[in-house]
Every structure is written in structure tokens, then in C-alpha cells.
Image (cartoon, coloured by chain):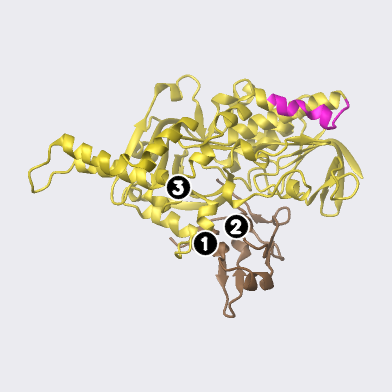
Chain colours: A brown, B yellow
Amino acid sequence: MQVDAKLAQNLFKLDKQPHITIDQRICATACTRRACLVVCPADLYEIGEKGQMLVNWEGCLECGACMICCDNGALSWAYPRGGFGVQYRQS
Amino acid sequence: MESVECIVVGGGLAGLSAAYGLACAGHEVVVLERGDYAGAKNVTGGRLYLKPLGAIYPELWAEAPFERAVARELLTLVGDGAQTTVEIAASRFVSDKPQSYTVLRARFDQWLAERAAEKGAMILTNMKVDALLRDGDATASGRVVGIRSGDDEIAADLVIVAEGVLGLLSSRAGLRREPEAAHHALGYKETIELPSQVIEDRWHLNAGEGAAQLFVGALTRDMMGGGFLYTNKESISLGLVVGMEQLRKRNDGLESWQLLNQFKELPFVRPLVAGGKVIEYSAHTIAEGGITHVPKLFGDGYLIAGDAAGLSLNALFTVRGMDFAIASGYHAGQTAIASLKARNTSASGLAGYESRLRQSFVLRDLENAKGIPAFMENPRLFRHYPEAVCRLLAELYSIGPEPARKMSKTVLRAVRRDFLHVSTIKDAWSLRKI
């Protein structure tokens, strides 16, 4: 089962602005490991056509693993605003 | 600025437990929860060990919306192409008062929030706290005087910080350190719907009873961690816990989400989830640092409780956190009541919190387990030993075309091959530390 299909089962309340932003300069120059690609359980990170890191923050499970594992502080990560983001109905 | 006696940041088990106690004593307490409802942002494996709570809010638990009382404990050692399961079902697990229950947090935390609200606690949902306010400039070690949420500031005599494992607010306010990969694990799971009868048949359970199954070995590909499976009333929680430091260093193209799919596809897991429908996918960070990474628990105007204080314990056979959250929340609440009565919510008036936790199971269990986090860094625990046990058993149970070897020879050869090395003998010696 693909991650997208799993995420589709979750209830997300989407904000207009992202709660994760990537400093492309740090990401492109200082980071070799790109741990975000490995750790994100929702597979939200991907490398764009120009080689830049992209994050599909809409499907974020709010675990914070990418923030903890980012080597060089390229991620600015906050919880979504109150009432937004994933709303777990089981868990 | 609006002002209240006590603010609780976070409507999870620690925060709600503190708020319930304060409200019972007639104090003005406001819980700020960023989710749509209490439990909307929480994830457990999971199971709650109720026995340690003993005298904490005994009136509550009889009515709690538990899923199943855990009657069967299974540990599956996973090798390459073989696995073996140890099972223990003891009457003491479920007799009279069961020692542990599986829970689902959305249901459970909402229920506890309702109980706290009945006693007079104000639970404000959809309210994300953006900062803890400190006296003087933000970087100073001034007293915590309240919170900011959006454009609103609320002052309080006391702030109970129960914001969860990431500790974003408390680390930014200088009350604790930011979480580090080396002392945390990633937990993620699927909630898979199955009819109650199927669950009871599949795990050989009496009505209402549940099973907890842990998996350790090849499934985590040499990384610290393992798989878990908990039976709920009409679903199972199936997931993985993997050490973050080891995960982030993978450079073989493996991604965390794939690992869970591979786990589900193992031939002995497939029949467990067959016919089930995934109804939720969730993830959470887990503190694994043990007592040496518990921050300072109190200071002028604040107390820290639950996951925000790193209060969780992975002890191989038992994985705990929610009981620590409820107990630390309880003790935070009781400390708050005493300090508000004495009109001293400075550090000197709140020091009783730490002594209370030191006398309770919370810091005693963590103290007794202080050798475990280092012990768990041994990669052989997560690959070599499960594999070695499976290999030996597979050999003992195998019949081939050739005449069989003497049994003692098979065993001795396996012991020499897998258990009598300098490293394994050192491992045996290191057992004394746990």
C-alpha cells in the first residue's frame, strides 16, 4: 500500500500557509545526507526538477522527525496553527 | 492582559491529568490544546499500564474507554527466513484488576478532557501556544509568567508545560534542550480495522481481552527498534519504532515508510492483517534517552510533565510512557495546588514536584533503568541474537535427506558459532547493567 493511500485515510485540516519551510541555500550547499528523505514516515520530501528539496507539508503527521534529523538547520518547522493539520481519529 | 491561576499547555494525558487534579481542588485551570479536540494530535503504540497508577484518581479508571485488557504477551524474534515467538499469558495480567489496557488516544484523551471539564477545568481546543512568556527579556532566565497564542497573551501564577515530546516551546524558552536524534526514536503505525470476532479468533482471546506483540530482529535492518502490534476492540495498531540516529544515517536508499510496508509483507505478518482495512496512518517521536536526558522539571512559575520532560521508558519487554504522563501530570497538579495555597509558585514553592516524582515510580523506574538506553545501542540485539535463536531452532526442527547429526552436536555447534565470541560474552556481562 502506497503512503498516499494511507494518508488519504487521515483527516487533515489544511491551512493556507505551510508550517514547514526549507532554506534552499542551506539545503543545497551544506547538506549532503538529506536525512529528511529517509526519515519522513509520510514520504513528504522529494527532490524537484532543479534539484531543490520540496516538501508536501499538507500530509504531515507532525512527528517532527525531519526537524530533529535535519543536519544543518535548513528546516524551519512549527506545528500548524491551532485547529489545522492532521486530526487523528484513532491513534 | 487576562490572568488565570494556572495554565496547562497541552491537552494530552499529562496536561489533562494535572488539570483534573487542580479542578477537583477548585482551582482555576485553563488547558490549551492545539488540536480540534484532546487526543487529536496524540499517538500511542499502544498500551497503558494501569497498575503503577495505584492511588492516582482511582475513581476514574473504572469508567475509562479502554480497548482491551492485555492478556497475552508475545515476543517474536525475526531472523532471515525464520521467526520464533515466545508467548506468556499469565492470570496475573488480567485477574481482578488487569495490569494494562490497549488504548486509542483520540477516544481516551477526549474522555479524560470531559472528566476534567466536569470538575471545572476549562479546555480550550484549536488553541496553539506560540511562546512561553518569561519575565524580563526573552533570553533571560526570568520567571515564566504566562503564554502567548497568536495575538493573545494570558498571564498565570503557574504554567504547567505538557506540550509533548518535541518540547518546541520549552526549548525555545530555555527550559530544556532541543530533542536530538541520538536520544529519540520514530514510531509510526497503521490502525487496521478488523471485526472484534476476527481479532479474538486470530489471537486466541477471550471476549474483551487483548494481545500485545513485539517483533525484534531482521525487520529493522540492523537498526535499534522493532515492530509492535496491539489489539484494540475493532482494530489493531501495527507499527514500527526505529532509532532516529540510525535511521538518518542510512545511505542505502531505504526510507522509513518502506520499512513498515516490508514488515506488513512478511509471511508471518500477512495473515495477521489479512482482510483488514487501514483506517489511519500516524507517527510520533519517542524519547528514548532515559533519566539522564530528563530536563530540569521545575523553575520559577513552571513545571514540566509527561513527554515534554522525556518521561518514557523502552525496556525491551515493556514500553511505557502514558503511565508516566498521567502520574507526572498528577504530581504536577498536586504540587501546583500546594504552591497556589502557599502563594509561592517560584522554584522554591515548586521543588516538591521533583521530590514527589523521585518518590513515585516515575523517576524510580527511570533511575533503575538508566543502563538500558546504552545497552540498547548494541546492534547485535536487533540482528544477531534474534537470527541466532531462529537459526538454532530451525536446525533442531529440520529433517533433511541426510542422516541427522546428534542433537548435542547441533546445539554445541550453534553455541560455538553464535554465542561464544568475545563480543557475545561481553554482551552477557553487560546484562548486569540493565
Chain letter behind tag 1: A
Residue B96 in percent (x, y) is at 48, 19
Secondary-structure class at tag 1: helix
**What amino acid type is highlighted by mark number 2?**
Cys
Q: Which residues are magenta?
A: B343-356
Q: Nearer the viewer, mark 2 or mark 3?
A: 2
Residue B34 in percent (x, y) is at 71, 49
**Residues marked 1 and 2, same chain:** yes
Circle 3 residue: B193
Circle 2 residue: A69
Circle 1/circle 3 CB separation < 8 Å: no
Chain letter behind tag 2: A
B346 magenta-colored: yes
Chain letter behind tag 3: B
In the picture, measured across the screen, residue B383 lies left or right of residue B278, that is left
Circle 1/circle 2 CB separation < 8 Å: yes
